[in-house]
Structure formats: C-alpha cells, structure tokens
Amino acid sequence: MIGPVGVGIGWRPEITGFVAELPGLRFVEVVAEAVHDGVPPGLAELRERGVTVVPHGVRLSLGGAEPVEPARVAHLARVAELVDAPLVSEHIAFVRAGGLEAGHLLPVPRSREAVAAVVANVRRTQAELPVPLALEPIAALFDWPDDELDEADFLAEILDATGAALLLDVANLHANARNRGGDPGSLLDRLPLDRVAYVHVAGGAERGGFYHDTHTDPVPPEVFDLVGALCARHRPPALMLERDGHYPPAPELRAELDALAAVSGYPVVT
C-alpha cells in the first residue's frame, strides 16, 4: 500500500499557519467531515507543495448494527478524490443507533456478531471508495459484558475478512491499558504490525480515576515509550501528532513533533 511516510500532524484550521511553516512536513490528516464544498485554502496549499493528505472519517459508524449511510460513504470518497489521497481512515466504533446520535465514538462489543456487523459495513464502504481504507481501534472506558474475543483476535478477524489496513493509535493503547487493564506491550506482540498504514500519537489526562484520551493535553512520556516499543518491533511507515484543541505555543508543538521524530527515527519536520 502506498500511503503517508515520516512524521506528520493532524491538520486543523486553528493551526493552519503553524503547519504551513513546517519545512520537512510529509503528510497531514484532515477530518473528512470538516471538508465540504472544496479543499480549505491552507490544505490546498499543502497539497500543492506535495504534502500527502489523508482524510480521517469520524461519522460512518462502521460498528453499528445498521448499514452505513450511503451519503456519508460518498462524502468520504469525494474528499479522498478532492485531496488526491492515497488512502482514507475510519474508526471501529459506532456513533448512532435507532436514529439517535451519540455525539462521540462508542466501543463495539468484541463478539462474533459485532465482527460480522463491522465486516459488512467495511465491505460496503470499501466498495464505494476510490482508495484503500485503514481502520482505527478506539479508546474506551469499559468492556462490554458479552465480549467473546480479546482485542488482538477481534482486530485480526476484522482485518483478515476485509483486507483493510490498520491505523494504530498508541495513545488509545495507553488509555485502554490504564482504564481496562492489560499490557500494551503484549498487545503489540500480537497485532499485525505489518498491516499498519500509519500511527496516531496524542495526549490525555487523568480525571475521575480514568485516563481520558483528550487530544488537548501534551503527549505523556508513557505514550512516547509505547512509540519506541512499537518501532523496536516494526517501525510503521508514518506517525502523526494528533491535537484537537487547547493548542500550546508553537515552540511546544514543535518540541512534541521533534520528540516524535526522535523516538521513531524519522527526520524532523520542524
């Protein structure tokens, strides 16, 4: 699969100027639902520079019991064409059921029935996309009581049945280990790391006895340690810093990008 390479960052309108000034930037990710009638100017300028743009969907509800909505799939496909993307990504999660919108990503039970539902929706989506699809397991605060599979087997069944790539979020691995138990290093040993298209790296915070994957806090040392553990096993082709609010001063963002480059062994982008 031809996809992003090196170190990248999530493109957001609030940090357009900062991203535009990163001389070594190779790729960015854009939330697909934030792209409407055309490519936002700042993103278009990056594309003209040769920066790869990956659309990242958040509203398909691939893990829902209901079929994915054709209009949402068509929009994701259209964004991929607009930015000349090499691939797109979405979450193994559901966001709606029975006509009700949750407003955030909800975990799918790790059951064989859920695997079948995810696989059916992924195949429906793949049939309409002009490029490959990468799937991201989410962070969650709980496990469903009817789980039949552990995380590694659950993901393996979905990826094997669909041929999709894996978008691995190491911050989610850290959050799930803190909140749901388990050893993220042992999970890395069992995941198909050769199927990883790219990696998310983000910050979080402790609140109310849980670790929340906020995307608005600095990346903690434990997450950078997980990046190092991942790269020691199988270095992914690309890793990106994901930040969705409470943006720090530019020197702090540059420092996080530099730290990501250092731990992964890729060239700095700053």
Image: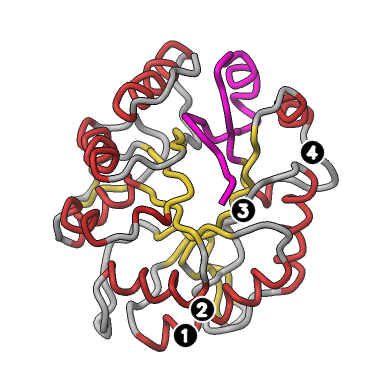
In primary-sequence order, the first of circles 4 and 3 is: 4
Cα distance between the residues tagged 1 and 3: 21 Å
Q: Which residues are magenta?
A: 1-29
**With respect to residue 184, does 52 lie above or below?**
above
Q: Nearer the viewer, mark 4 or mark 2?
A: 2
Contact, mark 2 vs mark 3 (Cβ under 8 Å): no
Characterize the local packing of mark 4: few (<14), some (14-19) or many (20 or more) Cα atoms within 10 angstroms: some
Q: Residue furthest right?
A: 37
Alpha carbon distance from label 4 to label 2: 30 Å
| Camera-nearest residue between 70 and 154 | 154
> Mark 1 is on which residue type?
Ala
Question: Residue 116: which numbered mark, if any?
Answer: 1
In the picture provided, is 149 more to the left or to the right than 160?
left
**Which residue has dot 4 on it?**
39
SS type, badge 1:
helix
N-term mark: 4 or 2? 4
The residue beneath circle 2 is 119
* Residue 25 position within the rendered picture, expressed as x and y whole percent measured from the top left: 56, 23
| Callout 4 secondary element | loop
Can residue 104 be seen here? no
Task: Tell me the tag on residue 88.
Answer: 3
Q: Amino acid at mark 3?
A: Val
